[in-house]
Image: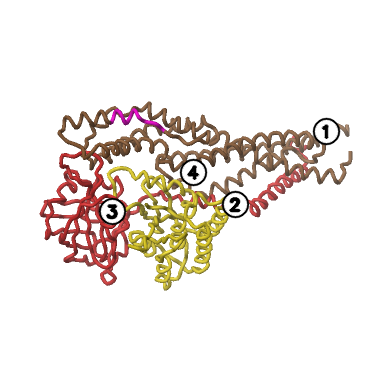
Chain colours: A red, B yellow, C brown
Amino acid sequence: MIKNVNKKKFASNLAISFFFAAIFVLCYYFLLEDKIMPYVSLINTTAVRGEDIEIIAKYNIEAKRLIDYPSYGSKYATLEIPSINLTLPVYHGDNKKILRLGVGHYTGSYFPGENGSILYAAHNNAGLFHDLDKIKVGDIITIKATYGTFKYQMKEYKIVKETDLSAFPIQHDKELLMMYTCWPIDKGIAGHKKERYVVYAEKIGDEIEKE
Amino acid sequence: MKKLSLIALFVGLLVLGTNVKAMTEAELKGKLFQTFEIGGKDYTLSDDQKVIVERYLEKNEISEADADTIWAKVQKALNVIKGQGNTNFTKYPQSVKNELKAIVEEISSETKVKATLTKEGLEVKNSDGTKVIIDTPVKRTGYETSKTAIIAGLSILIVAVGTCLVIKQVKTSE
Amino acid sequence: MKLKKNNIVLSYILGFVTLFLGVIFALALIMKFSIGNKHYLYHLVKDNNYYQTIYDEINDEMQSYLMSTGFTNEILNNLYTKDEVIDDINIFIENTYLGKETKLVKDNIKEKLDSNIKSFLQKSNLGVLNQNDLLLFEDEMVNIYKNEITLYKMANTFIPKYYKLNKYINISLVVSIIGLIMLYIFLRKIKIYSWGVIILGIGMIILFIRMAVYDRIDVDNVLVITENFSQLLRIVLHYISRLLLGEGIILCIFGIYSIFTFSIRRKYHKSIEIR
């Protein structure tokens, strides 16, 4: 049977097939590629998943800026408030998962040592910011980050509406630590809390880790 | 009330899609942080968004390319938006939407940024593989349902260019 | 019979058109067996434990919300059942398939929550700030349930496009079948090559499309709206890729075989004539 194959016919038919396919491929590249590629790019743009990469923060003393920022969701510091006997882990980011673990650091604020506003949040449950309203003016707050230790002193507190963003000024010329939690804190009231208790503290000293 | 607008989109495009020489980074910031006037209202990045933009510029490799060309495209898009007098993209006529889409497509295929919208906010992947989630500054104990509803309205286009930054209306009297 | 030159040219042109329609048919068929198929979507969520995942996710999100409110998990008792979650997800799939937005009314959850809260408040000696805040809280909790089912309304921008896509798939199938039948009848008389030429061509193009589009997409890292939804999306894309690959390979093999047997037959018939 194989001997009876007309090789020329077989080859020519294969060639015609390849010819047809080649025309289609050329049509695709000249007519459709530009239309389809944005959709391919669109899908690839959303390809943000992947293994979480751990980055340890590095600090530039002269520039007063971090060189490497800690990964989102990673613990990069410990918050200590001796006056209320509180020690909590601080994470970069403040989504719901992080707030269940400890203190969340808002990504749109600066890091300790960067001479700007730092915004920390935590729930008002026992073991988190439950005793935030017991911090007094003058109390020392310490942030022990992987790149250095920073000390702050409480200056004032405010009770503000949750929508009042002016109470959380993000500025870059003075290091201001703002810590907030939902208010009222366990005052016999349950339900959706529409206010925030905010503690403001200014930096009084630091100790940078030498590499 | 916070609105997501196309200005934010294109400003973000320039930040995240452009390749500039390091020496013009200050110029770039100046351009990005300026106030845009559209339909009598002023738009600018909020302070926390500026922190995120600055951090992104520092964190991600920026190679040499023609920033002016990309800025020209952004200006072109801004002029189209200004012509509409508002930033409510969903209400634009189809021809305008197509015009904007064409500009976005010109830039988006060159954009190397990776970003997506999730229920938590805008998730951006940096060039070193780390990520950042951009959402609102003050956390509520519950859901930011208003935020997700707003985001949903522009989700496709936002994802297409890989970024979105919330712009607050700047009241000139404040 | 000597074929006229015009017929030869026509044979090639029509052959290419047949091939083009064949590609459309092959692609539309794959879509019809996957994203264009409601039953496939139901199987997808069932086989990948999506119902249980969403049920757990709702519970988790509600507990996260409770953290700063002073309420305990007690108020979540018997708020909703897994069957309810399954039914609502199925409603969402059905509506999405029909291009409609899903608006869930969950007054039952709100009423049950209200009852649980009242019992809790009585037992715990806690109060609420005011009735409006309590209603706000209850609405937020119900929204958690609704948002997890309906993908936070972010899918609303995609739903009309998905519906349009399904329409195009159906139209493409019908048009390509009719076109192929007509071209088969006409081409049969004038073609100078084997049908295998067209089949092999379709197979190669399917494989090319898979390479040109799918291989350029970073499927495993796609993340939109929620991780749970994205996982389903990834499974669908991988499934379509396997269908494209399988279909392409089968068509190529069948095409080559057809050409082979076509070549043999002609030689065989010629040898009979000579005898």
- Which residue is denoted by mark 3 in the rendering? A164
- Asked whether the beta carbons under mark 3 and mark 1 sit within 8 Å of each other, the answer is no
Along the horizontal axis of the image, is B43 left or right of C201? left
Q: For the N terminus of chain A, give its image quadrant.
A: top right
Magenta region, residue range: C104-113
Do discs 2 and 1 belong to a common subunit? no
Q: Secondary structure at mark 4?
A: helix
Name the residue furthest bottom.
B23
Please give the chain letter of the residue carrying mark 1. C
Question: What amino acid type should be assigned to the residue bearing mark 4?
Answer: Thr
Question: What amino acid type should be assigned to the residue bearing mark 3?
Answer: Asp
First in sequence: mark 3 vs mark 2: 2
Which quadrant would residue A3 be assigned to in this image? top right
> Local crowd at mark 1 within 10 Å, few (<14), some, or many (≥20)?
few
Residue at 49% from the left image edge and 33% from the top image edge = C95
Q: Secondary structure at mark 3?
A: loop
Residue A24: % across, % down:
68, 48
Please give the chain letter of the residue carrying mark 4. C
Whether the magenta-drawn stretch holds residue C108 is answered as yes
Please give the chain letter of the residue carrying mark 2. A
- Which residue is denoted by mark 1 in the rendering? C269
Q: In whole angstroms, how far apart are the C-alphas of marks 4 and 1? A: 61 Å
Up-down relation of residue B38 to residue A1 (above or below): below
Mark in front: 3 vs 1: 3
Residue at 30% from the left image edge and 42% from the top image edge = B142
Which quadrant would residue C6 be assigned to in this image? top right
Question: What amino acid type should be assigned to the residue bearing mark 1?
Answer: His
Mark in front: 3 vs 2: 3
Q: In whole angstroms, how far apart are the C-alphas of marks 3 and 2? A: 45 Å
